[in-house]
Amino acid sequence: MTRAWILPVLLVLCGSVVATGRVLDGAPGAAAVLLSVFVLLAGVSSPLVFPRSIGALEAQRRSAVDGRPVVYWRPGCAYCLRLRIRLGRGARRLHWVDIWRDPAGAAAVRAANDGNETVPTVLVAGRPHTNPDPAWVREQLSRPS
């Protein structure tokens, strides 16, 4: 769990240091803007941007019932963030599994990707798709189960 927060915390700390330097130089407005940018970057790189993660076994069980795809992801992954943002509100309809928090999820991703933990890996109808186009994933959501 703590590994997911390292980058966001570092971004906030660095932003605080840079902003403090700007305040000491007599530029409080620039300090506020810089700090805001660092806090925004920290928020985007944090797990808070993603829907609540569940375990891989639970996600697969739910997917078998409702037919919705399972997304294996990890915090700090730019491709996962791209998928999440491009899906918009539809992202809530997917089952999200954080592979850093769930060993079974990490194992499922390694099994699908020749031993690599390549994310996002989207499981649709039992078939893995590594780093799929977000439009394709959105299309999978609109298909009847």
Image (cartoon, rainbow, N blue to C red):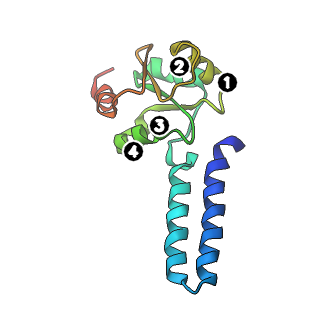
Q: Is residue 141 left or right of residue 76?
A: left
Q: Which mark is residue 85?
A: 4
* Nearest to viewer (mark 2 / mark 4): 4
**What is the spatial separation of the Cα atoms under label 3 and label 1, in whole angstroms?**
18 Å
* Nearest to viewer (mark 2 / mark 3): 3
Query: Mark 3 vs mark 1: which is more N-terminal?
Result: 3
State whether residue 73 is above or below residue 108: below
Residue positioned most to the bottom: 26
State whether residue 70 is above or below residue 4: above
- As helix, strand or loop, the secondary structure at mark 2 comes to helix
Residue at position x 55%, y 62% in the image: 39
Q: Is residue 135 left or right of residue 29?
A: left
Q: Quadrant of the N terminus?
A: top right
Mark 3 nearby-residue class (10 Å; few <14, some 14–19, many ≥20): many
Residue at position x 65%, y 55% in the image: 10
Query: Residue 29: x, y in percent?
Result: 50, 81
* Between 47 and 25, the one nearer to me in the picture: 25
Mark 1 nearby-residue class (10 Å; few <14, some 14–19, many ≥20): few
Amino acid type, residue under disc 1 in the picture: Pro
Amino acid type, residue under disc 2 in the picture: Arg
Q: Which residue is mark 2?
A: 61
**What is the spatial separation of the Cα atoms under label 4 and label 3, in whole angstroms?**
9 Å
Q: Which mark is residue 103?
A: 1
